[in-house]
C-alpha cells in the first residue's frame, strides 16, 4: 500500500486579496512536510473556472515549486486535461518532461477529460467527442515523449507536422500514465489501455475490491492494448481525511471540509445553476447540505469502524477517513485487503485549517503508516513478476508508431497549406449537419432545464407535486430525457427503465413511467413495464428537482428517500446517458 495526498486548492467564499497566495503557500508547506514524513505521492488536479471548488488551473507550476522543496515524494498530475483545445499535446509533453528532469524523475502523468459544463463549455468542447479526444491525445503525447524526432500526426483532433519535441523525460520510456475515473466504465478503460486508475469516487473498500478484481482481469486479458509504451498497473482511491487523538475533535476539524468537497463537486458536475463570479457555493452548502446528502449531525464519535458513507435517521452523509489513528488504520487495512494499490487523502478541503492538516499528516505517519510499510517492496516485486508476462503480451499488441523521417525539412508555407486543405475536407456536409443538430439539441435541453429550475426553485414539496402531478407535465420531463438520450454513453444497453414517483405531500397514488432503450434510441410512455433492468423510486418533488439541476440524485438516495433496484452499474451511467454530466 502506498499513500498520497491530493489537492484541488479549495477556497470557499468570502475571499480577500491575499486568500489565494495564502492557500498556495500553505499547500506547499504541507507537501514539504508530507515528503519529510514519508508520504509517497502528491497529486495536483487541473480545473478551470470552478470557483471555490478548485483554484488549481496551473498544476505544472505548483508541482514545479513542490519539486524544489522535496526530495522523495512522487509528483502526480491528477490530472492534466488532455483535451487538445485545453492543452495541446506538444505543450503537455514539454511541461511533463521538464518537470521530470528538474524533479529527478519523480513525475506521474495522470490524464483526463473533465465533464463539468463550466470547463467543456468554456473551451467549446463537444461532450460526445471528448473520449475520442482523450484516446488520440494520449497516444500523441506518449509518442512525443519517446520519438526523436516526433514523426508528426494527422488525426481527427490533432494535426502536427514532424518536430523534435524537447526535452525528453528522465524516466524511460515516459513517466507512468494514469487516467481519472469516476465511473466503473472508466476503470475498465484504464485496464484496457494499460494505465493506472485514479478513482475519484468515494467508494467503500468492499466495492473497491470488485473494481480492483475487474481491473486486473481486464489488464491481463487480450483486451488490453496499452495507450503508452509502458504499462502502469495500479488502482488508487481517494478519501477525505482528518486525524486527531480524539474522534470528536477529528470530526469537528474535518467533516465540514469533506462535506464541502462532495457538495461543491456535485454543484459543478450535477448541473446546478451557476453565475460566474456571483454564485456563492459555500453559502449554498450551508443552507442545503442536509437535503443534498451531507448532513453533519449524524456523524458522531462512537468509535465505530469508519464507513465512507453513512445512512441513519433517514438521512445520509459522507465520512471517509475522519477519526482516530486506530480507526483510520483499520479502514486503510480494508482497502489493502481489497487489493487497492494506493490510498490518496484529501485534507485541504473547505475551510480545513492548515495547522490541523499538518497535525493529521504527522499522526498518520507516526501511528498509521508503519503498519503498511514492512514488506511493501517485496510484495510489489512479486506483483511485478506476476504481471510481467501479460504486460509483455499487451505491449506487443500496441500499434507501432510511424518511423521518423530524417529527410523532412521544415517548410512553414507548405505545412500551413496542407493544414488548410485538411480543415476544408475534415467534415462532410452530413457530418456538419450532425454537429449542428447535436448542438441545437444540447442548447434546447439547457434552455428547458433552466426554465424548469426557475419554476421549481424555492417551491415546497406540495407545490412541486401540484405543478407536476399531471401526466402532461411529467410527459414533458420524460420526453425530454428520451430526446437527450446518448447511445454512445449507453455502451450497447437495451432494455426498460421504470420510474416510480411517490407523491408523499399530497397523498396521491404513485405515478409510473417507463423509458425503453432500443436500437440506439429511447422512448418514454406512462405506466410500468415487465422485467425492467432498473426500477427507480423517487419522491416526485425530488425527481423534478433533479431534472431541474437543483439537487444531485445522490442526495435522495443517501437520505433514504429514494431507492434503486436492479443493475447498479447501469444506474451509475444514467446521468450521462440522459444528458447530465458525470465528474471528470
Image (cartoon, rainbow, N blue to C red):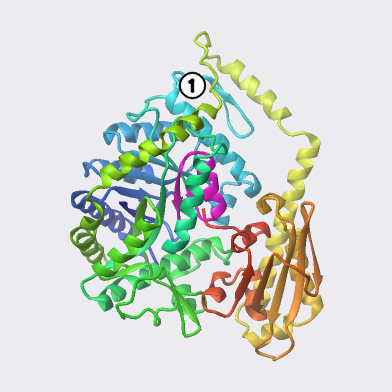
Classify 504 as above or below 123. Answer: below
What residue is pinned by disc 1? 150
Q: How many marks?
A: 1
Q: Position of residue 326 (x, y in %)?
A: 25, 68
Classify 363 as above or below 287. Answer: above
Classify 2 as above or below 504. Answer: above
Residue at 37 percent of width and 25 percent of height: 167
- Inspect the magenta stretch and tell me whether residue 185 lies in it: yes
* Mark 1 surroundings within 10 Å by alpha-carbon count, few (fewer than 14), some (14 through 19), many (20 or more): many
Residue at 64 percent of width and 20 percent of height: 417
160 left or right of 476? left
175 left or right of 409? left
Q: Position of residue 381 (x, y in %)?
A: 31, 39
Outermost residue toward the bottom? 507
Classify 299 as above or below 124. Answer: below
State which region is magenta: 180-200
Residue at 22 percent of width and 44 percent of height: 70
Q: Position of residue 520 (x, y in %)?
A: 77, 52
Given residues 505 and 22, the one toward you in this image is: 505
Q: Is residue 52 visible?
A: no
Q: Quadrant of residue 9?
A: bottom left
- Inspect the magenta stretch and tell me whether residue 53 lies in it: no
Q: Secondary structure at mark 1?
A: loop
Q: Is residue 346 visible?
A: yes
Given residues 388 and 345, the one toward you in this image is: 388
Amino acid at each position: 500500500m502506498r499513500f498520497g495526498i491530493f489537492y484541488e486548492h479549495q477556497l470557499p467564499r468570502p475571499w480577500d486579496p491575499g486568500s489565494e497566495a495564502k492557500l498556495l503557500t500553505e499547500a506547499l508547506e504541507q507537501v514539504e512536510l508530507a515528503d519529510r514524513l514519508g508520504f509517497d505521492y502528491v497529486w495536483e488536479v487541473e480545473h478551470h473556472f470552478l470557483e471555490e471548488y478548485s483554484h488549481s488551473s496551473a498544476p505544472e507550476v505548483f508541482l514545479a515549486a513542490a519539486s524544489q522543496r522535496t526530495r522523495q515524494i512522487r509528483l502526480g498530475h491528477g490530472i492534466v486535461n488532455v483535451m487538445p483545445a485545453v492543452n495541446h499535446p506538444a505543450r503537455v509533453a514539454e511541461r511533463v518532461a521538464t518537470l521530470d528532469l528538474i524533479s529527478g524523475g519523480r513525475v506521474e502523468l495522470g490524464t483526463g477529460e473533465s465533464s463539468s459544463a463550466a470547463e467543456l463549455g468554456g473551451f467549446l468542447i463537444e461532450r460526445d467527442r471528448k473520449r475520442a479526444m482523450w484516446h488520440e491525445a494520449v497516444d500523441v503525447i506518449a509518442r512525443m515523449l519517446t520519438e526523436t524526432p516526433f514523426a508528426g500526426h494527422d488525426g481527427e483532433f490533432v494535426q502536427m507536422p514532424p518536430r523534435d519535441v524537447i526535452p525528453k523525460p528522465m524516466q524511460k520510456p515516459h513517466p507512468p500514465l494514469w487516467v481519472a475515473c469516476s465511473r466503473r466504465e472508466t476503470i475498465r478503460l484504464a485496464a484496457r489501455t494499460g494505465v493506472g486508475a485514479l478513482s475519484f469516487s468515494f467508494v467503500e473498500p468492499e466495492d473497491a475490491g470488485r473494481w480492483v478484481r475487474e481491473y486486473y482481469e481486464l489488464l491481463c486479458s487480450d483486451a488490453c492494448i496499452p495507450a503508452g509504451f509502458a504499462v502502469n498497473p495500479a488502482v488508487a482511491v481517494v478519501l477525505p481525511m482528518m486525524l486527531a487523538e480524539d474522534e470528536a475533535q477529528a470530526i469537528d476539524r474535518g467533516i465540514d471540509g469533506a462535506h464541502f468537497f462532495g457538495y461543491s463537486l456535485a454543484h459543478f458536475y450535477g448541473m446546478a445553476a451557476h453565475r460566474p463570479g456571483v454564485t456563492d457555493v459555500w453559502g449554498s452548502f450551508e443552507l442545503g447540505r442536509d437535503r443534498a446528502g451531507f448532513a453533519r449531525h449524524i456523524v458522531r464519535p462512537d468509535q465505530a469502524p469508519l464507513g465512507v458513507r453513512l445512512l441513519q435517521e433517514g438521512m445520509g452523509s459522507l465520512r471517509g477517513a475522519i477519526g482516530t489513528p486506530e480507526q483510520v488504520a483499520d479502514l486503510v487495512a480494508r482497502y489493502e485487503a481489497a487489493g487497492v494499490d494506493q490510498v490518496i487523502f484529501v485534507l485541504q478541503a473547505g475551510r480545513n485549517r492548515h495547522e490541523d492538516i499538518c497535525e493529521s499528516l504527522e499522526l498518520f505517519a507516526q501511528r498509521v503508516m508503519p503498519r503498511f510499510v514492512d514488506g511493501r517492496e517485496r510484495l510489489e516485486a512479486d506483483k511485478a513478476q506476476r504481471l510481467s508476462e501479460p504486460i509483455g503480451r499487451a505491449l506487443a499488441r500496441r500499434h507501432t508508431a510511424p518511423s521518423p523521417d530524417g529527410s523532412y525539412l521544415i517548410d512553414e508555407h507548405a505545412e500551413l497549406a496542407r493544414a488548410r486543405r485538411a480543415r476544408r475536407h475534415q467534415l462532410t456536409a452530413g457530418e456538419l449537419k450532425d454537429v449542428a443538430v447535436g448542438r441545437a439539441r444540447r442548447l434546447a435541453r439547457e434552455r428547458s432545464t433552466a426554465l424548469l429550475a426557475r419554476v421549481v426553485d424555492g417551491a415546497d414539496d406540495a407545490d412541486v407535486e401540484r405543478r407536476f402531478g399531471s401526466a402532461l407535465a411529467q410527459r414533458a420531463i420524460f420526453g425530454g430525457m428520451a430526446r437527450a438520450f446518448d447511445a454512445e454513453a449507453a455502451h450497447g444497453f437495451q432494455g426498460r427503465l421504470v420510474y416510480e414517483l411517490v407523491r408523499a405531500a399530497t397523498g396521491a397514488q404513485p405515478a409510473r413511467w417507463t423509458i425503453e432503450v432500443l436500437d440506439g434510441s429511447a422512448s418514454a410512455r406512462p405506466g410500468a413495464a415487465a422485467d425492467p433492468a432498473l426500477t427507480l423510486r423517487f419522491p416526485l418533488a425530488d425527481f423534478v428537482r433533479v431534472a431541474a439541476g437543483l439537487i444531485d440524485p445522490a442526495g435522495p438516495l443517501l437520505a433514504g428517500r429514494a431507492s434503486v433496484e436492479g443493475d447498479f452499474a447501469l444506474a451509475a451511467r444514467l446521468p450521462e446517458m440522459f444528458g447530465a454530466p458525470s465528474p471528470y
